[in-house]
Image: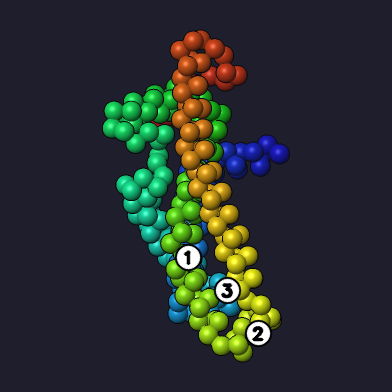
Amino acid sequence: MEALAAVFKELYTSFLLRDFAGKIVPGCFLLVSYSALFLQPREIIKGITGKVSLVSVFLVAGLAWTVVLGLQSLAELVGIWQYYPSAAGAEMAIQSKDIAQFLQIACPNDRQQYERFVVIKEATGNLFIAGLLSVPAWAWWLNTQLSSDETKKEVWGSPRINIRTGIVFCFGGIILTGLFLMNHQHVQKQYEFAKQVLNDVHDGTLRGCKPESKPEI
């Protein structure tokens, strides 16, 4: 159990989970979605589950990471989601300063908990953006699949496509809404946690661990 705990701790402290869950996974979903404009999903899945070289994996992961990094910047710019609770210049500067102070004094356990909030915030926010941008691609694919009655039966096994399509899009809308709300909740939770740690330190409240050395920001 100690070894497993050490592995999870390393995933958080080295930001591997933030990159994987927050950027690579949403990026891969977006790339697969737009690949459906040129290939059938079954062909894409077959290619993914088949023999793939390690070089290809790193190239796709790197492309996904880079694409989502750019999308995250645009999402923050247009206000779809924010890195801090407030987007106002003065307030954001204060919040950024609070986070910098927190990272200087926080003990490893507090830093790990803080990073967990960040991972969830980025994963849900970026997956929301990827899902939103993927809607046109999947709508186009669905339209091509429903171009004839024969295709309807082949894909869905039933001519009652309108009901099934409605269920799929409603379910997708619920998921996107949940991701959007979860992102905004953890933007707030992340800052509130850091602020609480700072207040406890300033008040002299013991938090169960002591920062033996100042971690890098």
Quarter placement of the N terminus: top right
Task: Confirm whether residue 196 shows in the render.
Answer: yes
**Disc 1 element:** helix
> Residue 153's mark?
2
Task: Confirm whether residue 13 shows in the render.
Answer: no
Question: Residue at 51% of width from left, 32% of height from top?
Answer: 189
Which is more toward the observer, 2 or 183? 183
Residue under numbered circle 3: 45
**Badge 2 local density, few (<14 within 10 Å), some, or many (20+)?**
some
- State the colouring used for the structure image: rainbow
Amino acid type indicated by mark 3:
Ile
Quarter placement of the C terminus: top left
Which is more toward the observer, 192 or 173? 173
Counting residues from the N terminus, which is met first, the one under dot 1 or under dot 2? Answer: 1
**Disc 3 element:** helix
Amino acid type indicated by mark 1:
Val
Counting residues from the N terminus, which is met first, the one under dot 2 or under dot 3? Answer: 3
Q: For the residues marked 3 and 1, what is the alpha-carbon distance in whole angstroms? A: 19 Å
**Which quarter of the figure has residue 146?**
bottom right
Which is more toward the observer, 76 or 15? 76
**Disc 2 element:** helix
In the figure, 139 relative to 98: above or below?
A: below
Question: Residue at 41% of width from left, 45% of height from top?
Answer: 81
- Observer-side mark, 3 or 1, equals 1
Q: CB atoms at circles 1 and 2 under 8 Å apart?
A: no
Residue under numbered circle 1: 135
Residue found at the far top of this picture: 204
Amino acid type indicated by mark 2:
Lys
Q: Position of residue 127 (x, y in %)?
A: 49, 54
- Observer-side mark, 2 or 3, equals 2
